[in-house]
Image (spheres, rainbow, N blue to C red):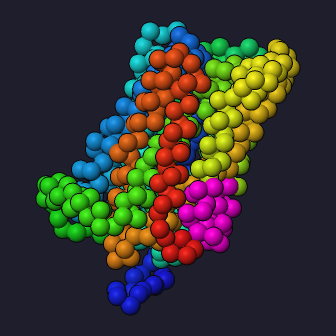
């Protein structure tokens, strides 16, 4: 066991390395849902094979993502307050983890041609999203009890990197062994799908849901077994239900006296909304604009996840060297550039006005120039997404009052969810109004510009 303490507080005892590694494995366990379901396998399958057309698929997926985010926003204050006052986080992680498992399992039954396929897919996705997001929130709330504040940046970056690696492995398994091209019947590795999965009815794509559920159950176990939980406070659930909300209101009322914290939380809320929406529609955009199928999208996802893993590791080191704020601003600038670049692309167009030859059948993966540019921009997004999220957590650790770091990490988690429905919903509305996937993604530029402007005004100590 290790100890750390300050002049104004008694020494704090931290758990051994195996407990920290077990906690990090939660990211490995949960990430396949975001990689397989929300981005690279099931979401594009939904848009291409279940919805009537890609634009409608993007809109429906956006509304579902927005509804899930709204539910999270409405429930976060109450549940976060209750958890803070009662103590333990693991019961909450188990409950919402079960929701993730059930919702992901439902996706198997979204069979093309079935009249119930779209409702089943959207209901399962909403349920699993709520479960995954809340389980992640309560897992993050355990972080400040694992390492001293000066090591939170490294812990945060390592967690993101391990999560990306878990997504990469699950995606490689799905593409190499399970999901097949409906025309050839072969996986990316040139094999027939395992378990006799039928390529015509897209069973490999649909199996991404049950695989996500099984993966979570197996790999979340070390956290439950080895990572110590927050001790019970002795406060009953009923007492906490009222007291938690009252304390949240008092903290929010105090934010104007802590202008740097309030501005940071608002900035994080806005640029995280944009990032959620960008990831939610990245695969769908590739499927709709370039006609990418499971193989193209899967290779895209593997490459993006590799850069994401590398970016998270390097971002943690860069955070230690120059501080969290410069890393966040640099990441936002890269995301703005990527969004503008994506908007400039079409099947036969680059940089808005430059004509390019579209890919022809049989040309191979990413054969056209617009596809290559989209691939490059996607890799850039993957490279900076991890550092953006990890450095946001470490920056909060630097600017929050040390004696109340746990309280403000809880508020940080809440702020990240309160408006998480806005980005996907506005993308869906713009897509519907203009019947264009480009119009949907254009709204994200405003999110990143506003978030960058707000974070630029946050005053931090040197190195923060």
Above or below: residue 144 compared with residue 239: below
Q: Nearer the viewer, residue 118 or 396?
A: 396
| Rendered position, 102 above or below 3 | above
Image: magenta residue range: 311-330
> Which residue is drawn at the image coordinates 79% and 32% (left, top)?
372
Q: Residue furthest bottom?
A: 7
Q: Which residue corresponds to the image point at 47% horizontal and 68% vertical from the top-left?
A: 459
**Among the 4 quarters of the image, the one containing residue 405:** bottom left
Q: In the rendering, at what x and y percent does residue 144 appear?
A: 42, 69
The one nearer the camera, 450 or 387, is 450
Residue at the image position 69 percent from the left and 35 percent from the top: 341
Residue 179, visible in the rendered structure: no
Decide if residue 434 is on the left or right side of residue 228.
Answer: right
Where residue 295 sits, quadrant-wise, is top right
Residue located at (24% from left, 50% from top)? 78
Q: Position of residue 116 (x, y in %)?
A: 42, 13
Residue 380: tell me if it is visible.
yes
Q: How many marks?
A: 0
Q: Nearer the viewer, residue 209 or 407?
A: 407
Query: Can you tell which quarter of the image residue 42 is in?
Result: top right
Determine if the magenta segment contains residue 94. Answer: no
């Amino acid at each position: 066991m290790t100890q750390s303490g300050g002049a104004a507080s008694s020494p704090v005892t931290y758990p051994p390395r195996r407990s920290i590694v077990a906690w990090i494995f939660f990211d490995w366990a949960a990430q396949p849902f975001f990689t397989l379901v929300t981005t690279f396998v099931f979401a594009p399958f939904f848009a291409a094979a279940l919805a009537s057309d890609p634009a409608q698929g993007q809109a429906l997926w956006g509304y579902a993502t927005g509804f899930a985010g709204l539910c999270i926003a409405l429930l976060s204050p109450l549940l976060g307050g209750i958890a803070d006052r009662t103590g333990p986080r693991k019961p909450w992680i188990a409950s919402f983890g079960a929701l993730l498992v059930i919702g992901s399992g439902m996706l198997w039954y979204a069979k093309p041609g079935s009249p119930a396929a779209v409702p089943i897919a959207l209901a399962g996705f909403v349920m699993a999203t709520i479960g995954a997001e809340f389980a992640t929130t309560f897992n993050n709330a355990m972080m400040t009890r694992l390492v001293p504040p000066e090591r939170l940046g490294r812990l945060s970056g390592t967690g993101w990197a391990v999560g990306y690696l878990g997504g990469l492995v699950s995606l490689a398994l799905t593409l190499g062994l399970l999901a097949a091209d409906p025309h050839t019947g072969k996986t990316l590795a040139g094999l027939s799908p395992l378990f006799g999965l039928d390529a015509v009815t897209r069973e490999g794509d649909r199996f991404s849901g049950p695989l996500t559920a099984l993966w979570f159950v197996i790999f979340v176990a070390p956290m439950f077994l080895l990572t110590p939980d927050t001790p019970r406070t002795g406060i009953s659930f009923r007492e906490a239900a009222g007291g938690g909300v009252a304390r949240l209101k008092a903290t929010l009322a105090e934010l104007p006296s802590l202008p740097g914290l309030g501005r940071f939380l608002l900035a994080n809320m806005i640029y995280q909304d944009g990032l959620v929406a960008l990831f939610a529609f990245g695969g769908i955009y590739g499927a709709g604009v370039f006609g990418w199928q499971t193989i193209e999208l899967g290779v895209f996802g593997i490459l993006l996840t590799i850069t994401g893993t590398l970016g998270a590791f390097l971002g943690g080191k860069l955070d230690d060297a120059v501080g969290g704020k410069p890393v966040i601003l640099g990441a936002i600038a890269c995301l703005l550039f990527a969004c503008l670049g994506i908007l400039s692309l079409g099947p036969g167009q680059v940089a808005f006005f430059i004509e390019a030859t579209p890919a022809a059948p049989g040309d191979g993966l990413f054969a056209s120039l617009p596809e290559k540019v989209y691939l490059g921009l996607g890799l850039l997004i993957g490279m900076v997404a991890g550092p953006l999220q990890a450095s946001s957590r470490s920056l909060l650790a630097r600017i929050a009052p040390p004696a109340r770091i746990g309280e403000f990490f809880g508020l940080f988690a809440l702020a990240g969810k309160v408006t998480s429905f806005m980005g996907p919903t506005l993308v869906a509305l713009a897509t519907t109004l203009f019947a264009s996937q480009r119009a949907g993604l254009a709204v994200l530029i405003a999110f990143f510009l506003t978030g960058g402007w707000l974070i630029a005004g946050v005053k931090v100590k040197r190195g923060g």
